[in-house]
Image (spheres, grey):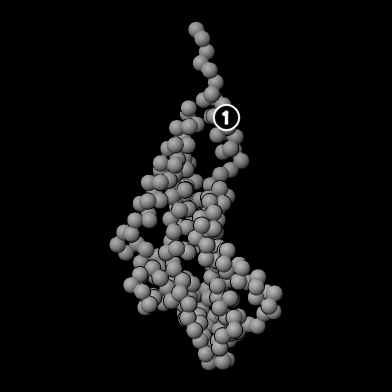
């Protein structure tokens, strides 16, 4: 029963915190989008020797969490653009990982370290998704293409784009694995098993 109550409490807290973060509080998601654009620009502003990338607030929609990615080939003097949802691809998995960590019954110090390391790993994954997306758009048959991969590698890149780079569910799966990695230690599993066993032991008779 004790283990059941602990699990129920965890999921109730998870639902509470995740809902709290997903509610569009004024300025929160907008602020994340602007930080996302600044960070992405610092990492991917120069793409290879001839590529240049800019991340700016979207002008195509009224959604402030959408980002326009401007791509430019300096050598060919040609460019294009793509749209990236910083909310779906960045903020939502960040909110989910944060809710998981806050819902886990751990000392505050361990939660802080788990959060910091988790954010580092999760944003490394988001950067990897961006790298895949930018490589794809700079390699397809367009006037600003930087790369000319073979048909085989172009097919591989397209499949990665389809099933990894823009799959919101996959981001939550990655966030869950990161949560397990940064939150739990070997001793935690043993402690949980001991508590579960203790909770199932029958009461001794007088």
Say above or below: 187 vs 31: above
User: Front-most of 37 and 145?
Assistant: 145
Can see residue 38?
no
Left or right of 135? Residue 96 is: left
> Can residue 78 be seen in this snapshot?
yes
Q: Position of residue 205 (x, y in %)?
A: 51, 9
- Badge 1 element: helix
Residue 58 or residue 169, whichever sits in front: 169
125 to the left or right of 36: right
Position in image of residue 158 (x %, y %): 60, 71
Q: Quadrant of residue 23?
A: bottom left
Residue 155, image x, y percentages: 65, 73
**In the image, residue 167 lies at what x, y percent?**
52, 62
Residue closest to the far top: 206
**Figure check: 20 above or below 32:** above
> At 48% from the left edge and 32% from the top edge, which residue is drawn?
4
Q: Is residue 96 above or below residue 108?
A: below
State the residue position of label 1.
194
Q: Residue visible at 49% across and 84% down?
A: 80
Q: Residue at horizontal 52%, vertical 13%?
A: 204
Which one is nearer the viewer's eye here, 10 or 41? Answer: 10
Going 61% across and 67% down the picture, which residue do you hit? 160
Residue extending furthest toward the left: 26
Label 1 Cα crowd, 10 Å radius (few <14 / some 14-19 / many 20+): few
Left/right placement of residue 20 relative to residue 86 reads left
Query: In the rendered picture of this protein, how many numbered marks are placed on residues?
Result: 1
């Amino acid at each position: 029963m004790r283990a059941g109550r602990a699990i129920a409490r965890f999921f109730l807290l998870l639902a509470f915190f995740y809902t709290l973060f997903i509610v569009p509080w004024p300025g929160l998601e907008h602020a994340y989008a602007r930080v996302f654009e600044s960070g992405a620009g610092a990492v991917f502003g120069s793409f290879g020797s001839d590529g240049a990338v800019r991340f700016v607030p979207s002008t195509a929609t009224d959604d402030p969490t959408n980002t326009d990615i401007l791509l430019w080939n300096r050598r060919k003097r040609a460019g294009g653009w793509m749209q990236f949802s910083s909310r779906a691809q960045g903020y939502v998995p960040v909110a989910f990982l944060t809710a998981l960590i806050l819902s886990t019954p751990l000392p505050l110090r361990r939660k802080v370290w788990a959060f910091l390391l988790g954010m580092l790993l999760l944003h490394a994954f988001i950067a990897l998704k961006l790298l895949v997306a930018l490589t794809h758009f700079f390699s397809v048959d367009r006037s600003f293409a930087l790369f000319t991969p073979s048909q085989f590698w172009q097919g591989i890149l397209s499949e990665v784009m389809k099933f990894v780079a823009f799959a919101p569910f996959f981001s939550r799966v990655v966030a869950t694995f990161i949560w397990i990695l940064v939150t739990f230690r070997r001793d935690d599993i043993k402690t949980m098993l001991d508590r579960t066993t203790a909770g199932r032991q029958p009461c001794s008779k007088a």
